[in-house]
Amino acid sequence: MSVFSGLESAKTRKKSTFREYTEALLIAVLLALFIRAFVVQAFKIPSGSMMTTLLIGDHILVSKFRYGIKLPIVDRSLIDWDRPKRGDVIVFKYPQDPSKDFIKRVIAAPGDVVLIKDKTVIINEKPLDEPYVRFTDSRVLPAALSPRDNLGPLVVPEHRFFVMGDNRDESYDSRFWGFVDASVVKGKAFIIYWSWNKDGQLTLDPERCFVRWNRLGHLVR
C-alpha cells in the first residue's frame, strides 16, 4: 500500500469517526428536545406561594403528557385524554404574561361554583378539605378591600380552571387575575428531584443544610 493510500484511508476513518460523533450528538439533542416538549420538563420554584408543599429552591419534574399531547409554542392540543382535576398541582403560562410560568393548585374545574368566605374555600356549596393550606396572616380582609379572603360566588367557565397557591395569604392567583385556560396548562408536577436552600449551612440537619436531602424524591401532592 502506498503512502498516499494510507493517508487517504486515515482521513476517511477520521471523517467517519467525526460523522458518527456528530450524528450521535444530533440524535441526543433531538431526543432531549422531544422529551422536553412532549414528555417531561424540569422547573425551579422561585417563590413561596406554594409553601409548604413546595419550597423556594425546589426543583421539580412536570409531566407534559399527563393530560394529553400538545404542540409546543402554539399551545394546540393534538390529543386530550384527561384534564386537570381538583387538587392537581399544575404548571401553566401566566395569563397576564405568557413568558412567565406559574405553579398553583387546581381548586375548581369547569362548571364548579367557587365561593371564598372568611378564608374558607367553598366549592359547590361544600367547604373544601385542604390539609395542604398554610395561613400566615390572622386578619380576614373584607371583599371590598381585597379578594384574598372573601370572593364570589363565581362559576368556572368551560375549558378554564380556578387555581390558588397553598401559601394562601401570600399567593397571587385566580382570586386576583382570574381563570387559567386549559390551552396554557403545561403539565402536572409530580416529583421533587433536587432541593437547594441558598440560606443553608454546613450541617447534618436536613432542615438547615444547603441541600434539603429529605425532600429529594418526594412526590408532589
Image (cartoon, rainbow, N blue to C red):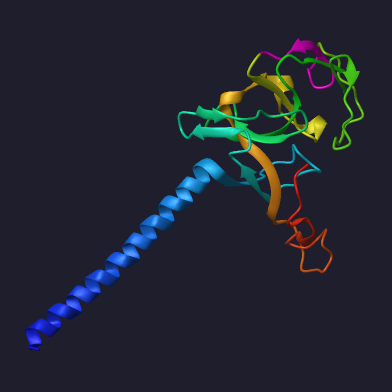
Indicate whether 94 appears above or below 123: below
Foreground of the two, 55 or 106? 106
Horizontal and vertical percent for residue 197? 73, 56
Closest to the observer, 113 or 20: 20
In front of the other: 25 or 54: 25
User: How many badges with numbers are in the image?
Assistant: 0
Query: Is residue 190 something that shows in the picture?
Result: yes
Give how far across and how far down residue 78 sits, in percent.
50, 29
Residue 49, compared with residue 124, is above or below; it is: below
Q: Is residue 189 left or right of residue 13?
A: right
Say if 48 sits above or below 205 in the image.
above
Quadrant of residue 139 within the rendered picture: top right
Q: Residue 145 appears at what percent x and percent y?
A: 80, 15
Is residue 57 among what the camera can see? no
Pick the quarter of the image with the N terminus.
bottom left
- Please say whether residue 24 is one of the residues in the magenta stretch: no
Q: Which residues are magenta?
A: 145-157
Within the magenta stretch, is there residue 154?
yes
Residue at 58%, 39% (x, y): give it: 64
Residue appearing at x 75%, y 48% in the figure? 219
Magenta stretch: helix, strand or loop mostly: loop
Quarter of the image with the C terminus in it: top right
